[in-house]
Structure formats: C-alpha cells, structure tokens
Image: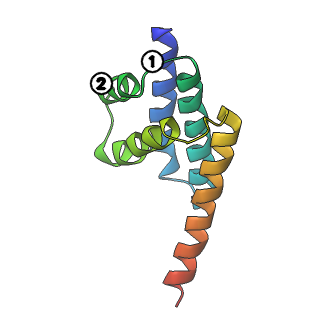
Amino acid sequence: MKNRVTIIIFLLVVNASSYAQDSNDTFCEWLGNAANAVAQNRDKGIAEYDLIKKYLEQSTSYGEQSVVIPLIDRVYNFENNLDPDEVAFAEKQQCEIAMVISKSSLSK
C-alpha cells in the first residue's frame, strides 16, 4: 500500500509540472484526475495527514503544494464521501467555472 501512495504522489507531481505548459482546460483535467487519485487514497483508508505528509516528502515546488494540499483537504472533507469519479467531476467542473469567470473578468 505504501508503494501505491508513492506512485500516486509521483504521478501528481509529474502531472503538476506539465500543466504549467498547457491550457486552462488541461489544468482543469489534471485537477480532476488528481482529485480522483486523492479520493482513491481516501477510500483505501489512508489518513488525510498521512497523505499530505507523504506528498510533502516528495520534491515539489511551493506552487504545486499550494494546489495539491488544499485539494487533498477538500476531497477528505466532502460532506457525503463522493466516490472518486464524482469527486473528479466536481473538481473539474468547479475549475472550469472559475476559469470562465476569470476570463470574463479580465476581458472587461
């Protein structure tokens, strides 16, 4: 189980570094996928702070940490424990809505 967590965290870090070069849509897709991975860890019984600790042990930038750590907190604190696919969908939709609002605010 420890290896699975490490692999998932590694994938999160690799994906986080690649999103900076892609569009906002890709970022939202990445965020949804990351939320899915976090929810899978939650469902496997990994405690929130254990997951955060393992994530922080990885070599990551502050920018990545500022996205992933709040994501972990949100996923673990969803009121009705949505399944991983529902969590991913919710995070992706919220991200896309935020991007649309952000773009419309900048265009004024």
Report crowding for label 2: few under 14, some 14 to 19, many 20 or more residues within 10 A (C-alpha). few
Please report the residue visible at 53 percent of the width from the left and 23 percent of the height from the top: 41
Residue 57: assigned label? 2
Residue in view at x 36 percent, y 30 percent: 52
Residue 6: which numbered mark, if any?
1
Which residue is outermost to the front?
Answer: 79
Q: Amino acid at mark 2?
A: Glu
Residue 39 image offset from top left, x and y in percent: 57, 31
Question: Does residue 87 lie above or below 102 as drawn?
Answer: above
Instruction: List x then y, in percent, for residue 94.
Output: 60, 58
Q: Position of residue 27 (x, y in %)?
A: 56, 52
CA gap between label 1 and label 2 equals 10 Å
* Numbered circle sitting on residue 25: none
Q: Residue at x 52, y 48 (%)?
A: 19
Q: For the residue marked with disc 1, what is the amino acid?
A: Thr
How packed mark 1 is, by other alpha carbons closer than 10 Å (few <14, some 14-19, many 20 or more), is some
Where disc 1 sits, the SS reads helix
Left or right? Give the position of 65 relative to 9.
Answer: left
Q: Residue 56, located in which quarter of the rendered image?
A: top left
